[in-house]
Image (cartoon, grey):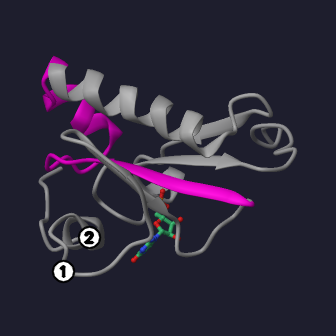
Amino acid sequence: MSYDKSNIFAKILRGEIPCDRVYEDDWALAFRDIEPQAPVHVLVIPKGPYASSDDFAARATGEEIIGFFRAVGRVARDLGVVGSGYRILSNCGPDAHQEVMHFHVHIFAGKDLGRMIKPVDK
Ligand code: 5GP
């Protein structure tokens, strides 16, 4: 999958559209989801042009991967949700309903999030 730099998160990274930023460093930007699905719902995106988790895993440098996941942990700690717990999730491709084609991790927290997914239909 090629990276389309007109996606909405690329525009946020370039400062062309605003976001409610909670953290930024050399590797990642974290901001609140525009349509939160939990009391705490933050998106963490890498600075580099990666379309999905698959693209990131395949093409990102070790430095980028370490920097990104260190940022995810840092954001959760800064949000104060490590004790109560949180969920990280990344949708990849059509079956997962990935909407924005710039790799991102969702951080959900702030309530009992229930079981991860529904049991498979038999
Ligand atoms: P996906 O389905 O790709 O994993 O999730 C994309 C997420 O991006 C959704 O939760 C959606 O609410 C969020 N989102 C889409 N456009 C914007 C935007 O312009 N700003 C922010 N902050 N979040 C957005």
Say left or right for 76 vs 83: left
Q: Name the residue under label 1.
A: 16
The segment highlighted magenta reads 39-62
The amino acid marked with disc number 2 is: Ile
Q: Does the magenta stretch include residue 56?
A: yes
Q: Mark 1: give few (<14), some (14-19) or many (20+) Cα within 10 Å.
A: few
Quadrant position of residue 13: bottom left
Q: Which residue is drawn at 86% across and 42% down?
A: 114
Say left or right for 94 vs 48: right
Given contact means CB atoms under 8 Å apart, are the residues at marks 2 and 1 in contact? Answer: yes
Q: Which residue is drawn at 12% across and 53% down?
A: 2
Quadrant position of residue 62: top left
How far is the residue under mark 2 from the one under mark 1? 6 Å
Image quadrant in which the C terminus is located: top right
Q: Give the image location of residue 93, x and y in percent.
A: 40, 51
Q: Mark 2 points at which residue?
A: 12
Vertical order, 113 against 8 (above or below): above
Front in this rendered view, residue 93 or 103 = 103
Vertical order, 81 against 6 (above or below): above
